[in-house]
Amino acid sequence: MKKRWSTFVLPILWLLSFSLSGQISFTAKANKYVVGENERFTVEFKLNERGSNFNPPDFTHFVVLSGPNPSQVSSFDSRRGRSFSLAYSYYLRPRKKGTFTIGSASIKAGGRTYKTEPLKIEVVEQAAQPANPNDPRALAEANAFFKVQTNKTTVYRGEPLVANYKIYFNTQVGNPQVMEEPDFTGFYKETVELKNIETRNERFGNRRYQAGVVRQIILIPQKTGALSPGEVKMRIPTIVETNRRDFFGFRSRQQVDQEQVERFPRITVKPLPETGRPSSFEGAVGDYSFDVSVSRTELSADESLSLKVSVKGSGNLKLANLPEPELPSAFEAFDPKYKESIRVNQGGMSGSKSNEYLLIPRYGGTYKIPAMEFSFFNPDTERYETLRSKSFEVTVEGGVPSPGTGSAVAAEKEGVSFLGKDILTIKKDLELSQRSAPFFGSRLFYTLLIGMLVLLALLTGLGIYLKNRKVDLTLEKQTKASKKARKHLAKAKKELDAQNIEVFYEALAHALWGYFGDKLNIAPSKLSKETIADKLSAKTIDEALINQATDMLNRAEIARYTGVTGLNSRKDYEDTALMITQMDRHL
Amino acid sequence: MSKLFFLIPLFLLAKLTAFANPQDTLAAANALYEKGEYTNAVETYERLVETGFESEALFYNLGNAYYKSGQVGKSILNYERARLLDPDDEDIQQNLEIAGLSTVDRFEVLPKPLITTAYQGFFCALSPSNWAIVALMLLAMSTVSLWFYFFGSNKRLAFILSTLSFGLFAVSLFMGYQHYGYQQNNQAAIVMEASSYAKSGPSVKAEDVFILHEGTKVNVIEHFGEWYKVRLPDGKIGWLGTQDLALVHL
């Protein structure tokens, strides 16, 4: 068992010793591990070989004042042969007290990746003295530095504030350069153009310095809360005098390109108060004056008019909206001419902006340009202020009168827009009814519909039935007419035989009238010789036969009423019988 | 069984006595509205509607109360209901228009062929129920004229009258059915939710087609389970859940 273990491990150790003898090492080193809060220190990552792909750690808890600064050294030594080293160094400043770890850096060398051990740095209360008063960097920092100063740290949203990057120096400095600046999210930023840096004597701490503003910016916060914009990095080339003396006994001078980092002061942005906010408020903060003017109030139809709306003052003028006038539709308005003259200076923004509207009247008449309002929040008084312009009355002479003139000017092309946008009030009518199912499709409707249709059908049926029955009756009468006539004739014959002439004619007449009445379907009330003749001729009966019939009727009548005897009664009887037989053939 | 029949009128009576005087309730609701207690006014009006009362003024006032309490969808729904009862009332039209201003959806209304609109205008001139009444009156006239044709003296006039009124009866009945069918296929409904997704089919899993917002009026053209198939004024078609819509016709 023991033997086996050694057979595996020993060759590995042997191989390892070879790789170590190659002596590639990558180490991290700081010049101090305990650092005062205001001290600077360096961290160096060193590789004793050629390497590539240097990957630095995160210096989250420290400010990188400069770095990575690479350096290479190659030398030849008789004992160790050729040697080479590559180093990356950083110049750092702590952010706050505490113990922090700088993570490991990595690099590629000889096909492998090497990593450094993490470094532990303890940041303590600031050191009483710079470690080395002769360090040119420390000297440079002491004699030239910069500060970020704002004129206010608590502002209202929309209230401009001024930030100055100011350098303090009492040695010779080159042209300072802002290397990095926060991106100021949540702010509207405007840079003040500074022609040259004016310097003057100023005290900082307990020393006197020359002080000058290098850069000035105006910030207008757009959101509320405590905002920390970030850090500003500035390069200040500084000449420092070292302790060394030159050939002539003067102190030798050295230029240090120091880069300093300053935190931008934290800014507390208060929201604008909700109470007392006028409806015309549109975000203007500052102190303003407001003016509306018209070029004239009386004009003829072919002239034009200009309306100028202007706001003057200081504050977030660039972000303030100009109120828009409500123009009567009788005027044609063109897009306004916008003008602004805004100066950005030490106090923020000030100046004026204006809109000029060109109005051309369409119709004659007197029109009102209503008063306009401009509201702003004054951060000094911490109150909203509303400025009201005058209203104007403009008289247009000549021209077509406006359609629908009156105080409420009706728009010609647009529909009438609701002014108040409120609904009409409720109705007072108290009538109510029970909701009912619609009549269409209800059972009642179908019952009535079907009932009435059935009634209609029944009525039609009844009518047709009755009409048919009437026709049947006449037919029956017609067929029975000859029989009835013959019956009456037979009766007449009996009377003739008994020589009762008067009665004979009566029977004869009865037979004839009855016969024609039934045969021709004539009601008894309408029965007359004329109607009979008419009906017969309508049925295209021979004229002679008609004459015979009327003749016979005449004779029977005469005989009946005159009582004339000795007439050829027998012949009359025979003629009548013959005529009826002939009639039957035709009818 | 006979006892049950006895109960029905009692029940109806109880229902009516709960609202001893609906006019008083309406007046009370109006008073609440005028005092600015819109939520209470809404409740009182709604009670009347639930009990089965209706009038153009009731729906209109309810619409106003909803509008004032900020419920645009319900206010539009009630204005539309009022308009059904009185299509020519100008107050209703105007308030409907104002309430419409605060809705989100805007449409380009599709133009309809002139002939269709004229025809539609004709059969929509009377409600189906009124067409039904006209048709029944014409049928009665036709029957009476027929009586005079068979048993009266002026048979020619009676015959013409009878045939003519029967023809008109048939036309009115047909118009009534046309209007009824049109109503069934174009049931107006109002979107009640602040926003509602219309789907491509009657299922939750179906694709979203468009979004509608509160107060928009749509036409319901089909009903399937929990879904309505709707047509927008610009011709778009989609399916909406029944819970998102309220039909104008009660």
Image: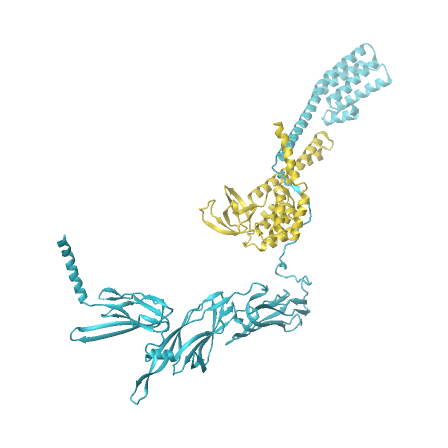
Image coordinates for residue A390, horizontal then vertical, percent: 65, 70
Q: Up-down: is A209 above or below A279?
A: below
Give left or right: position of A211 versus B25.
Answer: left
- In the rendered structure, the answer to whether residue A196 lies left or right of residue B80 reads left
Q: Is residue B134 above or below residue A485?
A: below
Residue B5 appears in the figure: yes
Question: Which color is chain B depicted in?
Answer: yellow
Using the rendered view, name the quadrant where residue A332 is placed: bottom right
Comparing A380 with A35, the one in front is A35
Of B184 and B135, nearer the camera is B184
Q: Nearer the viewer, residue A290 or B236?
A: A290
Query: Is any part of residue A586 visible from this angle?
Result: no
The single residue placed furthest to the bottom in the displayed view is: A248
Question: What is the x, y in percent for residue A196?
Answer: 45, 81
| Residue at 53%, 44% in the rendered image | B221
Instruction: Compare residues A4 and A496 and report the one nearer the observer.
Output: A4
User: Number of callouts in the render?
Assistant: 0
Q: Position of residue B157 (x, y in %)?
A: 71, 35
Instruction: Give left or right: position of A142 versus A510.
Output: left
Question: x%, y% of residue A398?
Answer: 69, 69
For the C terminus of chain A, the image quarter is top right
Q: Is residue A318 above or below residue A562?
A: below
Which of the 4 image quadrants contains residue B97? bottom right
Place residue A133 in its image quadrant. bottom left
Chain rendered cyan: A
